[in-house]
Amino acid sequence: MNRVLQYVHVDGPALDEPSGSVPLSVDSELLDAYSRAVTGVVKRVGPAVANIEISRKLPNGATQRGGAGSGFIFTPDGFVLTNSHVVHGAEGIEVALADGRRLPARLIGDDPGTDLAVIRIDGSNFPIAELGDSQEMQVGQLAIAIGNPYGFQATVTAGVVSALARSFRSATGRLVDNVIQTDAALNPGNSGGPLVNSRGEVIGVNTAIIAMAQGICFAIPSNTARWVAGRLIKDGRIRRAYIGVAGQDVPLHRRLVRFYNLNIERGVLVVGAEPNSPARLAGLAEGDVIIEFSGKPISGIDDLHRMMIEECVGQNMEMKVVRRNEIVTLAIVPEEHKVKEMS
């Protein structure tokens, strides 16, 4: 008896010829490998993901439950990363862990500029989610989101990294730069949960979706989260300098790097500058690429964010930018960043 080998055609309808087809057995193996990757990540990271519930004080002095979000434990002694908009202004915070425990938490600090916050629960030997290196991400790689949308605990969705170095303006008017775009489905309540790669490393903190859109979701990169969390744990807040620029990471042309003997291969493309901002007053223009600030190389938005510290406020600083094919030096005086209260 002749055996018949079934094929699944990748493109177009079924054809008589098997060329360009994948055997069902191979297809099943690929799907099984994908499933194992996702389930392995969930087993590794899921125990560290928490549901965060808050209460707010009413004008009459009473307290009322004010909403919920997600977060994840990133140190064994109970520090939890989440979004600033989840816990900002909360009167009380309660954390529900994957093992069923419900623990009170206290706010360590939050940074609306990056929509990140750190809270803490008392205890030790908590399961943790490890922060990975977001600079290693590539468009198309697997991305897994774990959170608590609409109160449904430990919900898992999977997709890919759709784009890198996005900028978007949140509903409160804050401009958030250098975010990860993913099509791993997020819903209200996912905010603050981890976006994880296939190795079980957190590559982002889920932060926002675009209303009425499908498959367009955003996360703050883990490298930004690591730096912000460290400052919040140390100081409780981040007093930021402000220059009024919206930008995104871009590669520098190799000829430019060689001609000027630059020690970086990337910079920050200026895609917008706010009116009357220090950037506008300094003459910064759309299309400029920032490569140096205060004598230090700037190879990305994260570098620029790190430079926007308290010591810069009111100081005369030098900024070097690539304008067309020339390097131009600008004088700029950063101002103190004024945080807008979130409604």
Image (cartoon, grey):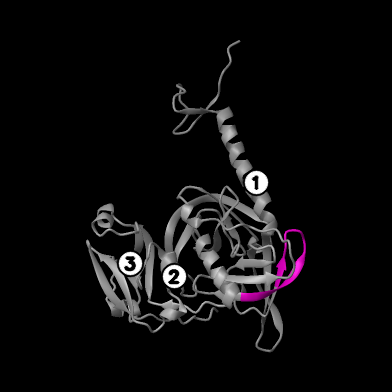
Q: Mark 1 and mark 2 in contact (Cβ < 8 Å)?
A: no
Q: Residue at x 41, y 65 (%)?
A: 301
| Residue 120 image position (x, y, % from top left) | 67, 71
Q: Disc 3 to disc 2, how far (Cα)?
A: 12 Å
Q: Residues within 10 Å of mark 1 (few under 14, many from 20)?
A: some
- Residue 290 highlighted magenta (yes or no): no
Q: Residues within 10 Å of mark 3 (few under 14, many from 20)?
A: many
Q: Residue at x 47, y 78 (%)?
A: 240
Q: Disc 1 to disc 3, how far (Cα)?
A: 41 Å
Task: Name the quadrant of the C terminus.
Answer: bottom right
- Which secondary structure lies at badge 3? strand
Task: Name the quadrant of the N terminus.
Answer: top right
Q: In the image as oriented, which residue stretches furthest toward the top?
A: 1
- Residue 98 highlighted magenta (yes or no): yes
Whether residue 211 is visible, yes or no, is no
- Which secondary structure lies at badge 1? helix
Q: Looking at the image, is mark 3 or mark 2 earlier in the sequence?
A: 3
Q: Looking at the rendering, which quadrant does residue 249 occupy? A: bottom left
Q: Residues within 10 Å of mark 2 (few under 14, many from 20)?
A: some
Q: Which mark is residue 40?
A: 1
Looking at the rendered structure, the kind of residue marked 1 is Gly
What segment carries the magenta color?
Answer: 94-108
Q: Looking at the image, is mark 2 or mark 1 earlier in the sequence?
A: 1
Looking at the rendered structure, the kind of residue marked 3 is Ile
Looking at the rendered structure, the kind of residue marked 2 is His
Q: Disc 2 to disc 1, how far (Cα)?
A: 34 Å
Residue depth check, mark 1 versus mark 3: number of the one nearer the observer: 3
Residue that label 3 marks: 290
Which of the two residues, 10 or 140, is positioned nearer the viewer here?
140
| Residue 281 image position (x, y, % from top left) | 29, 80
Residue that label 2 marks: 305
